[in-house]
Amino acid sequence: MTTSTLASIVQTVADNIPPTKATVTGKVPSWLRGGRLLRVGPGMFDVGDRSSFKHWFDGLAMLHSFEFAEDANDVTYTGRFLETSVYKKSKAAGRLVGDLFGTRSSATTRSDPCETIFGRSLSQYTPSTPGRGSDNTNVNVLPSSSSDKWIALAELTSVWQFDPVSLETKERVHIVGSNPELNRMITMTAHPHAASDSGMYNVGLLPGARSNASYYAIFKTDASEKYASELVCLLPAHDGLSYYHSFGITDRYFIFVESPLKLALWRAARSRDVSFADCMYWVHDKPSRFRLVDRKTSKEIVDVTYEADPFFCFHHVNAFEDDANGRLVVDVVSYPNGKIALESASLEELRGGGEAVECDFRRFFLPLDATGVTKVESEVLSDRYALELPRINYESRNGRPYRFAYGLGLSSPSRTFHDGLIKLNTETKETLEFFEENMYASEPIFVEAPDPKTEDDGVVLTVFLSGNPDEKKPFLLVLDATSFEEIARAEFACRIPTTFHGNFLPAARLPDSPSIS
């Protein structure tokens, strides 16, 4: 039996990957035809001989398109680097120019702190020119307010627009613009939530400087081409700033988890050897707090303090109001130690084979009639399977009661990286699974069928990467979302690097744009 290695999926791709047609087995559903799966992730982990990155989250952004032919049972893959400033400058210099999540650049000096990943934090949060700073948006891709552009995001205050058909890089847009209430913001999540009027909600970090307090800012970005943003609510930080990656939303509430994974940004300001990731530390004896904001009043609910045992989550799965029991239900992928979770994604760790990190799919219950300090009860919905990079039927179930979640899973406790997918029934805790030997799975994307009859009426799309590139080829998998059985797979005779997040662009929403060539 062959042995897979994680190192194979975290190696640098030297250049763009030209259109490559797949060998398809099975039959792609007709309603997927003409659409494409778009994803983004790290494609380059070193530049020249002098710049080797330290963390999985550092890799320079690469866009990926899996195009379903309109009139045939064909799939074509294309990979193209996002031509960000840090990418172009680093390629030209033959070394990293600009700071990344876990790697600081020797080419970035104190004399120009705005070229760092969080330049404002390293210059004592003095407001700088909007749009400057690191722009390596390698975490997520979403349709933008304009039908002919998509945006690539990371935990940065600017996004890159790109053409979803050609993958051509377009414009960089600074989300907070000139809004004086937000001009101290140095990060925002790469997981905004859709607003009912086609805008989007997000959470940003406003660090204090000198006598200023630190805040988390919930803000709304409109649906115009200018991406104008307005403040919804400021949440004062408790016990120092916390690192976070996502947040929750329901019809009535915004849900923000303030975990004991804290940020000491002053460390990076004092030393050129300290990255943003190095500024994080875990406070094991501090609780995690759930902060609720009433969407109608745009004010935090302050007569209750919801506390849970210490945990960190990269990803909120969903949340909803359980009116029958007078409570708010919040589902997350929970880690008992956030610092360990982040360190497990270092390139040294992954290339060394990786190590399984404890986490579970956990449901928290917040009583809405509570006052004062309230201990939040929770229930594990799945402990064997982490269900990381979780997805749901977002369009019909986000912020509402739901039954099904899809995520990455481990075929056995001895596995150190996700080698398959899990479908979880949140009501019965029953699971369906799909695993592939010596392969590594990517985030599952649920695509709803036309005229759906049930919540899980549709398909799940994922990309499996090879742990043995010389022996097994990567492939796009199409699963029946209801039965979790294979419908089709498209195998590619080229290398495909790892990705983080993505979304499906149906044919009906394709812009009038030149094809990839």
Image: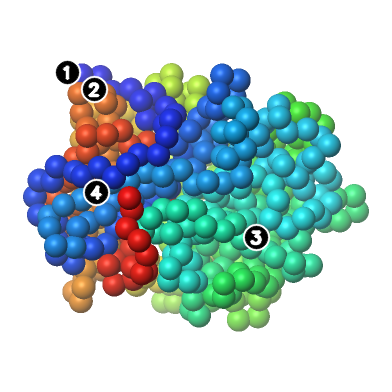
User: What secondary structure is found at the residue carrying circle 3?
Assistant: strand
> Which amino acid type is marked by label 3?
His
Instruction: Please name the residue shown 42% across and 27% down the image.
Output: 11
> Which amino acid type is marked by label 1?
Met
Q: Nearer the viewer, residue 196 or 234?
A: 196
Q: Nearer the viewer, residue 348 or 340?
A: 348
> Which amino acid type is marked by label 4?
Thr
Which residue was labeled with disc 3?
Answer: 174
Which residue was labeled with disc 2?
Answer: 470
Between marks 3 and 1 in the image, the one whose residue lies nearer the viewer: 3
Q: Which mark is residue 116?
A: none
Q: Nearer the viewer, residue 142 or 220?
A: 142
| Mark 2 vs 1, N-terminal side | 1
> Do the CB atoms of the residues marked 4 and 3 lie less than 8 Å apart?
no
Local crowd at mark 1 within 10 Å, few (<14), some, or many (≥20)? few
Between marks 4 and 1 in the image, the one whose residue lies nearer the viewer: 4
Between marks 4 and 2 in the image, the one whose residue lies nearer the viewer: 4
Which residue was labeled with disc 4?
Answer: 76
| Mark 4 vs 3, N-terminal side | 4
Instruction: Please name the residue shown 68% across and 64% down the image.
Output: 176
Q: How far apart, in angstroms, are the residues tagged by discs 4 and 2?
A: 21 Å
Which residue was labeled with disc 1?
Answer: 1
Q: How far apart, in angstroms, are the residues tagged by discs 4 and 1?
A: 30 Å
Instruction: Please name the residue shown 29% across and 72% down the image.
Output: 508
Residue 115 visible to the viewer? yes
Picture quarter containing residue 415? top left
Residue 122 as seen in the image, left or right of residue 231 = right
| Mark 3 vs 1, N-terminal side | 1
